[in-house]
Image (spheres, rainbow, N blue to C red):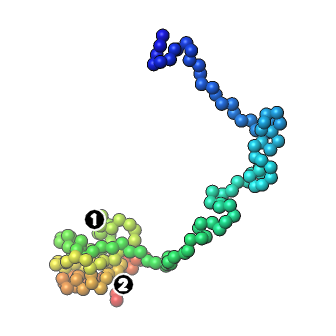
Amino acid sequence: MKEGGYILSNLKAPQQKKRKRVGRGEASGHGKTAGRGTKGQLSRSGSRKRASFEGGQTPLIRRIPKRGFKNPCRKEYETVNVGILERFRAKSVIDPIFLKEKGITKKRLPIKVLGDGEITKSFTVKVHKFSENAKKKIEKAGGKTEIVDWKKGHTINE
């Protein structure tokens, strides 16, 4: 009976490769040094080179020039534009809690209002920082700007 070009009675299981048993005597062919060769770092037990080792030459991470400066004291702000505040016509006081509830601010960072967009309604905006342009636009529309202390959450009089 032929199936796909083979005679079923002549099929045999594929040959399994025998496992290499190292360090089991000279007669095995893998005795004495157990396939590690003689001397050197790789022949020793328990010693492996780290993944980034480059054969003793200066590693790549040390060859690349260092550029720039990361200020560890940098203050990050979440930004909100004046144009977005225009949407809230019914609200008279806009504060960080209100902006968080409406989904405008996502992270837990201080908020800075920037001057992109136009504003016509007067608001009292209480946030952590304002750009000069945003402050002018809010006050021109008849609103007030108040800076809130980030740590304590109360208003700072300037």
Q: Residue at x 27, y 81 (%)?
A: 134
Nearest the camera: 17 or 157?
Answer: 17
Q: Which mark is residue 41?
A: none
Q: Residue at x 69, y 56 (%)?
A: 49
Q: Residue at x 56, y 71 (%)?
A: 64
Nearest the camera: 80 or 5?
Answer: 5
Sequence-wise first label, 2 or 1: 1
What amino acid does circle 2 point to? Ile
Whole-Å distance between the Cαs marked 2 and 1? 24 Å
Q: Residue at x 63, y 26 (%)?
A: 15
Side (left or right) of 134 relative to 152: left
Residue 108 occupies quadrant: bottom left
Residue 107 in view in this figure: yes
Q: x, y (%) of residue 135?
A: 27, 84
Side (left or right) of 61 relative to 137: right
Residue 9 occupies quadrant: top right
Q: x, y (%) of residue 128?
A: 36, 78
Question: Which residue is farthest bottom?
Answer: 158
Q: x, y (%) of residue 95?
A: 30, 74
Please identify the quadrant where the C terminus is shown. bottom left
Nearest the camera: 5 or 97?
Answer: 5
Q: Which mark is residue 156?
A: 2
Q: x, y (%) of residue 32?
A: 82, 42
What is the count of numbered marks? Answer: 2
Side (left or right) of 106 relative to 22: left
- Tell me the crowding category of disc 2: few under 14, some 14 to 19, or many 20 or more residues within 10 angstroms, Cα based: few
Regarding mark 1 in the picture, which secondary structure is present there?
Answer: loop
Q: Which mark is residue 102?
A: 1
Residue 93 in view in this figure: no
What amino acid does circle 1 point to? Lys
Mark in the foreground, 2 or 1? 1
Side (left or right) of 112 relative to 38: left
